[in-house]
Structure formats: structure tokens, C-alpha cells
Amino acid sequence: MQVVIGLEVHAQLLTRTKLFCGCLNRAGQAPNTDVCPVCLGLPGALPVANAAAFEYGLALGLALDCAINPLNRFARKNYFYPDLPKGYQITQHEGPLAAGGSLAIAVEGLEKTVRIQRIHVEDDAGKSVHAGEISLIDFNRAGVPLLEIVSEPDLTSPEEAAAYLKELRRLLMYLGICDGNMEDGSLRCDANISLREDASAPLGVRAEIKNLNSFKHVQRALNYEIERQTAVLAAGGQIVQETRLFDEASGETRPMRLKEQSHDYRYFPEPDLLPVALDAAWIERVRAALPELPWQRQARFERELGLSATAAEIITQSRPLADYFEQTLAEGAAAKEIANWVMTEVLRLIKDPQRELASFRVTPARLAELIKLVQTGTVSVTAAKEIFNRIAEAGGEPAALVEELGLSQLSSTDELKVLAAEVIAAHPREAATYRGGKAGLLGFFVGKLMQRSAGRANPKLAGEIIKELLEQ
């Protein structure tokens, strides 16, 4: 059986105000404070389209190489739900903002292109909060601008679906149009999945899994659904076209409702909004303002700086992290050394580069200076890591901390010979074994010397001196 998956991704846009009114678009406010007659759906309130939402949608469409629709009309999508105050959603039905692009992904080294069916603008609903036997509604989110990005059913495994979602999230964050915070609902995913005999067979009946809010949940839900649908078909049953919810605790999906058809929503043109025209000048202005896209930056880091594919991918996962890397590079440190420090030490302390790097005390200039101190032999890598941690906690300049903490690297041949002789004398059995032909013990002696020097000894020089003394 072939698995067929398509994703519908909803991305909340980082506009200053909501899509059709002047209410501020901000998270974390007291419930029902960022609301007005328009987003509450009160009689007589008239919407006005937010141009910034279309600019953000344009940026995404251009980045994905989509065809841009020059005349965008709105439609009402009619359905009832308590958190939908108007009784309908304002969306785009026919003629979306953008269509026909693609996004490249890689899974286990194999590349694949996923086609984009459409990108359209719509407003979000409110948020239901369930407390025991009662439900409360916060309308602060009602009217927040969304982009819905619909893929073609080109994905054939849960792993591909997760890779596609990760790459799309990376792009949205690079463009600065969505914060990508899946836990808070800024980025939400609905997955459509069906099975068929093989690639030449017609598409099977699909189930839609709603509101998946993490990469892990996407994979778990799809894996379960593959097992469920396979079992139903193997038993001679039929798949029901329905909407299902994912239960995080059990790892199972369960029925929510029968899947609606387009006509169930009774789409009709929005009478209170004029079409939004996107002229060529506007489109080209947005195109010219696009940043270097993440996959372009990743390829440049590999091609021009000699980074490995893994290092380039990790560093370009976040635009602030890639900026941090390049700013450190501009300070004169070596690219591969910076990459090693970023992947091991920086990301050990910075879990969310998007939010945390701006206030990180180890600035690009300080990291570059620290790397140079290691390269010139002024400090050992061990000492440099101690200084790095000190700066991250309390600030300070690398060179000053070397002096303050007494961490300058010991490179005096005479001093190292004394330490080496002491180490060899303290371990006569190991010395005899080394002299008997077990050259691998050299690292043991270097480690002991590093301990004796409190990590200050130049390990390369220490190794040479110990080897010389052992072989006398």
C-alpha cells in the first residue's frame, strides 16, 4: 500500500494589527481585551483589509516560487462554532493569493520536491478554554491574520511530512512573518492521509487529522492512522471520510465529525470587502526585500566556507543563529571553528535562538576573540570553555578573564618537562607498558599532565615532551 499525505498549515502572521480591524495583534494579553465590534462580529461593523497581511503572504509566495494572483477576492465560509463570533470566516475561496510553487525537503539524504497547491489569507477564530464542565472563550485571537498553506498530496511517509513542516517553519521564521511557535498555536497543522494500492491507483478515501501542534505529534498521529487504515482495509472494511483528533496521551486518533464537503460551507463572495489588487510594482518591491532564503544560505556556507552539510543545516535552522555565525565570522575567526563552538557551546545554552540570542552575553565579538585566543595558544580549549561559561553567566571580556582567572596556557618547555617527569614517575607501570610497545597510552599521560596543570598545559606540546621522555 502507498501512503498519500497532504498538509494544511495555518501560520499566524506577525502583523501589528488584526486582519480586518485596528485591534492589536499580540499574544499573552488578558482575555477579551484586544477586541472591537469588527472582530466580535457585532451588527453594522465593517471590515477593512490589512495590507501588511498581503505583503507577508506575497513574501511567502515569492519565496516558494508561486504564481501570484493580481486580484484577490474574499469569501465567507459559513459554519457555526462558539469561538467564531461572526458565524462565518472571511477567507479566500476561488483565486488564492498564490498557487503552484514548491518546497524542497530532504529525508535521510534523499531530496524531494513537494508541490504547493495554494496559499491564501484568512482570519483566525477565537480560542476556547475548557475548565471542568464549563468552556470559556477568549476572542483576542479572533481576526488575527492567517496564511493557510496547502500542499499537494506529494508526501508518502510521516517522516516526509515532519521534514516538510520543519522546512516550511524555517522559511516562515526566516521571512519574519510568523514566529513558528507551535506550542502556542502560532503554527498549526492539519494532516490529510489516505492509502492506495500503488502510485498508479486512484487516491483513497482520506481522513483529516486536526490541529497537530508539534513535529512529534505529526509523526505519531500519521503512524497511528496508517496502522488504523491498513487494519480496516485488511479486514475488508471501508475508510470513512472524516475529521479526526489526535489524543496525545494514547497516541491514537479518534473520530470528531464526518468530513465536510466544500458545499457544506456555503461559500459566497464577501459583500463588505473590495478585492485587493497586487500590482507589479508592489510585487517587485516585496521580491527585492526578500532576505537570503535558508536553503540558499545553507548552500553558500557549504560552498564558500567549507562547512559540512550537517553544520550548515544546523546553523541555518534559525535566522538569528545564522546571523550570529556570520557576525562572528566578520570579526576574523575561522568558519569551521565558529561552527564547532556554535553547535556545541552556544546551542548548549541557547535553546531558542529566535528569542534568546539578542540578549546572549557571549556576543559575536567575544566569541571571535575567544576562538583567536585558542588558535594563538594563549588558552587551551578547556580554559576557553570555562571563560565562555563565565561570560554567558556574568559578562566580561575574554582577554581580561584569562588574566583574572589565571587561565593562560602553559607553553614553557622547561615547566612542561618538570610536570611530564612527575607524571611519568607517578605511573611507573603504565610507563613500562608504553615502552613495551603500547603507544596508545600516550593519551593517558597527556590527560594526567593536563590534570596536574589544572588544564593550562598546551596539550600538543605536552604530548611531544612526554613522548620524548618516555622514549629516552
Image (cartoon, grey):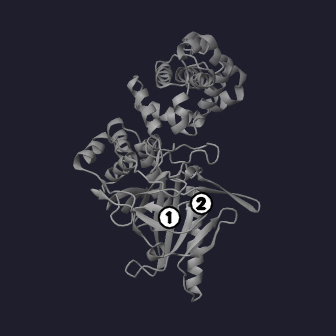
Asked which secondary structure carries label 2, the reply is loop
Q: Position of residue 18 (x, y in %)?
A: 48, 48
Residue positioned 43% across, 48% down in the render: 172
- Image position of 19 (left or right of 345): left
- Whichever of labels 2 and 1 marks the residue nearer the N terminus, that label is 2
Asked which secondary structure carries label 1, the reply is strand
Location of residue 289 with respect to 393 vertically, above or below: below
Q: Position of residue 124 (x, y in %)?
A: 51, 56
> How far is disc 2 from disc 1 in space, using C-alphas?
11 Å
**Number of numbered callouts drawn:** 2
Location of residue 45 with respect to 418 vertically, above or below: below
Q: Quadrant of the C terminus?
A: top right
> How many neighbours does mark 1 have within 10 angstroms: few (below 14), some (14-19), or many (20 or more)?
some
Q: Quadrant of residue 379?
A: top right
Kindly give the residue lying farthest to the left in the view shown: 280
Q: Position of residue 13 (x, y in %)?
A: 46, 48
Q: Which mark is residue 203?
A: none
Q: Amino acid at mark 2?
A: Asp
- Image position of 296 (left or right of 284): right
Q: Which residue matches tag 1?
A: 88
- Image position of 239 (left or right of 293): right
Q: Amino acid at mark 1?
A: Tyr
Residue positioned 47% across, 63% down in the render: 8
